[in-house]
Amino acid sequence: MSIIFDEKHNTVHLTNGHISYIMQLMDGKYLLHRYFGSALRSWNNTGVPRPAKRSYTTEYGDSQIYFDALPWEYPTRGRGDYRLPAMTVAGAVGAPISELIFCSWRVLDKKPESIVLPMTFTGTGKSETLVVECTDEVSGAELTLYYTIFDGVDIIARQQRIVNTGSTPIHITNLQSVSLSVPAGDYDLLTLYGCHAQEANISRVPLHQGVQSIGSSYGSSSPRHQPFWALLNPNTTEISGQVYGCLLLYSGNFAAAVEQDSFGAVRAQMGLGDSSFCWMLEPGETFETPEALLTYSSQGLNGMSHNFHNVLRNHLLPTRWRGVPRPILLNSWEAMYYEVSLSKIEIQARLAKELGIELFVLDDGWFRKGNDSRSSMGNWECNVSKLPGGIEAVADLVHGMGLQFGLWFEPEAISRDSQLFRTHPDWILQLPQVSPREGRHEYLLDLGRDEVCDYLLQVLHRYLGTGKIDYIKWDMNRPMTDAASNALSPEHQAEVPHRYILGLYTILRQITAAYPHVLFEGCSSGGARLDAGMLAYFAQNWTSDNTDAKERAAIQSGFSLIYPPEVLGAHVSIIPNHQTGRITPLDTRFDVARLFNLGYELDLTRCTDEEREAIARQIETAKFDRDWLQKGIFYRHPVIRPGDRMWSMVSADQNRCIAVIFRTLYDPLGEQAVFRFCGLNPTRNYRDMETGAVYGGDELMALGLTLPPRKQDFTTQCIFIQAE
Ligand code: DGJ
């Protein structure tokens, strides 16, 4: 891994032997992007397009170089480049125009940290960071670009920081985390879109001339679009072909846009904020962008996913939980909803323990006045008429049975019918003179205010400080409206959504550091805020409120493009399913969950003896495999029939593999199905642990195994092979 400066070509080249990222200085003052892709030994001005004539636009001196045709590394607006800018700021002059001039570049051995934003860290590996300093000649702002390359991880992490060195405020309306120039060509744009209980659907469309964009103005990253894009060659599949991927470490409003110009060249960007974003940077202040992760793979979409999984596992997830097996849990929600009671908890927990479950999670309901979502958020006092003795008594009961105890919170929300609202009505996000909208009978607390964050920290310390809580489910069910603060002057109001996220990160950073042994699970009505920013604090996340096995197969496949399976909560739940009414076999529900973060969300008193025995066997198998599954390499395999899914997990040492084949509806044509393995060692032999047959890794990957027919809908088949 190295960062190499080449004075002959005025370039800097970041490489780790797998990927290369190259920039070039033009005339010692303009920074151009030259290459991102498979590693090069060196770069000698190859592949630079002939200077393209852009008649009747602006030229650079007499040199026949047109600003509108250059592959700018960090483009600005108003000086002759008419494509998407990465930076739009206005200083004392008032015009949102910038002229970004290179000042210097250098290498840091230590990766810079942020005091507020989640960022990747070097960890036990190695990394180097390139720092490029520039000045905006118009606003006077100093902009620093950071590029980190990691050893053994095919990722470039990027971040920007801007300092106002002048004496008047600077208005920032756009500061991208990433702007990437991609050579002219045919590309598909792949993104993940969705809604509540239907998250992470794949959209793959051909790129066309003009701008294609996604984003969120939900206040959170939202279920609408993931803060992620991939640019692929049209013939790229799951297992082959070129992919550029980008992921933003941010949990609030974001925007991503890809522009193909009239000549086919592409500029792809992503950063915080929606179209209303504006930040007033006072003299002497610094503003930093969220970090973004760029990857390149020539191994298809699985290759891209492996790069993301690798960086998130080793350089972002809380260190305490890296590679650590997660407890198998029983969550109370679908069995009890708001109607929780000590006797129900006791019986469910006792049965759970008998089946081998390790953690009992008490979901919503424990603090509510009634049995609905109308009251009591904010004070977080247990309703002792439902649970005499309070939460400590519940924790003692559950611990007494030999289980860990987990508790649900939604700290960011507040009910109108709550003591906190009566005491501090000004603590919510609201506009003066306009009554705030309610969502799920909730308002949002103004997390941009220090006193609100301090209050929430006190509440959490009150519970966690007892030492009786092993797990927190941190929910957030309320998209943002009325994003205005009682504590800010009018010129800072547009900053509220970002200030909220900064407050949230501050709380999460402090509380997770204070209780490193507590497992925090992120949730936002399912996956409405499942993003890489949250992964810095939440080692696991509730993937979707839709727990139907068929729907989950699609949702988990979608999220697996970005996130490693062990961070995605997957529960075996009640049938008929509460979201779809569908009935699927118990085996199918388990198989769809088993490669992910396995849990149960069932009323165990309603299971038959046979079902309970089957669940006990499932849990035994899951415990046997979870160590290596947690660190395994996950593959999505191409399927012929829409709705079917084929996955496999190969252990990091290539000794074992579990394949899961999910079929939606029985189809006679499906009887010809073959499962071809991926990622095995071609020189080793593997035994099919069910049939005892032995095959070469090479033949299992080239030809695969023929799947036995199954005359049933919503079935799964699993193949477990082990190296000889
Ligand atoms: C939404 C979550 O996704 C559910 O799992 C559950 O925790 C409810 N909130 C509780 O209100």
Image: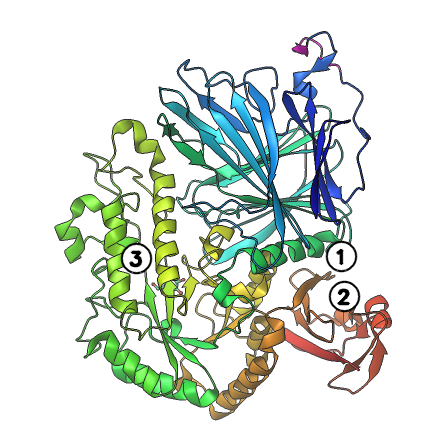
- Beta carbon at label 1 within 8 Å of ligand 1: no
Alpha-carbon neighbours of circle 1 within 10 Å: few (<14), some, or many (≥20)? some
Count of numbered labels shown in the rendering? 3
As drawn, the label of residue 411 is 3
Is-magenta flag for residue 59? yes
Q: Which residue is mark 1?
A: 239
Give the residue at x 80% y 75%.
706
Is 681 on the left-hand or right-hand side of 217?
right
Give the residue at x 66% y 17%.
67
Mark 3 or mark 1: which comes first in sequence?
Answer: 1
- Beta carbon at label 3 within 8 Å of ligand 1: no
Which residues make up the magenta segment?
53-60
Circle 2 SS class: loop
As drawn, the label of residue 678 is 2
Alpha-carbon neighbours of circle 3 within 10 Å: few (<14), some, or many (≥20)? many
Give the residue at x 56% y 77%.
590
Q: Residue 114: where, in percent of width, then height? A: 45, 45
Mark 2 or mark 3: which comes first in sequence?
Answer: 3
Q: Residue 336: where, in percent of width, then height? A: 33, 75
**Image vertical order of residue 487 relative to residue 18, above or below:** above
**Image vertical order of residue 441 relative to residue 335, above or below:** above
